[in-house]
Image (spheres, rainbow, N blue to C red):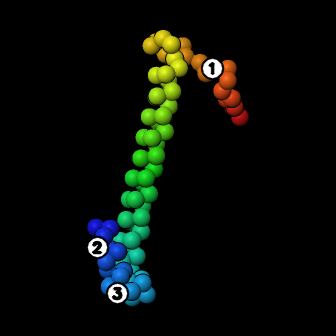
Amino acid sequence: MIWSECKEIWADGPREYVMHLWNVLDFGMLSIFVASFTARFMAFLKASKAQLYVDLHVPNHDISNASLPADIAYFTY
């Protein structure tokens, strides 16, 4: 779908492509889709990194009473 929109922009030219409102709507929807996919992927990477930290630095597997180590700065507002 994204590729077909890119081909349409290339074939018609940007000015002609923008003249049709549904093309702008399609482009906006595809942009939102790509942005949401990227945000989910980045959240997955951050969560994986956090889980790896917990797996490596928490000595016991019971994390019900876990606290941050002293070397980590934790700020609250």
**Which of the marked residues, 2 or 3, is nearer the chain's N terminus?**
2
Task: State the SS at label 1.
Answer: loop
Disc 1 vs disc 3: Cβ atoms closer than 8 Å?
no
* Looking at the image, residue 37 lies above or below residue 50: below
Residue at position x 40%, y 76% in the image? 24
The residue that disc 3 covers is: 12
Query: Which residue is found at the position 42% from the left and 84% from the top?
Result: 14
Alpha-carbon span between mark 1 and mark 3: 59 Å
Foreground residue among 57 and 23: 57
Mark on residue 4?
Answer: 2
Q: Splitting the image into 4 quarters, where does residue 5 fall?
A: bottom left
Q: Is 38 drawn above or below residue 60 in the view shown?
A: below
Q: Amino acid at mark 1?
A: Pro
Q: Is residue 59 visible?
A: yes
Which is more toward the observer, 77 or 1?
1
Q: Residue furthest front?
A: 56
Work out whether residue 64 can be spotted.
no
Disc 3 packing (10 Å; few <14; some 14–19; many ≥20): few
Where residue 37 sits: x, y (%)?
39, 53
Marks 2/3: CA distance? 12 Å
> Which three-letter amino acid code belongs to the residue tagged 2?
Ser
1 and 2 marks in contact (CB < 8 Å): no
Residue 69 is tagged as 1
Circle 3: element type: helix
Between disc 1 and disc 2, whose residue precedes? Answer: 2
Q: Quadrant of the C terminus?
A: top right
> In the structure shown, which secondary structural element does the residue marked by tag 2 occupy?
helix
Of labels 1 and 3, earlier in sequence is: 3
Mark 1–mark 2 distance (CA, rounded to whole Å): 51 Å
The residue type indicated by label 3 comes to Asp
Residue 28 horizontal/vertical position (percent): 42, 68
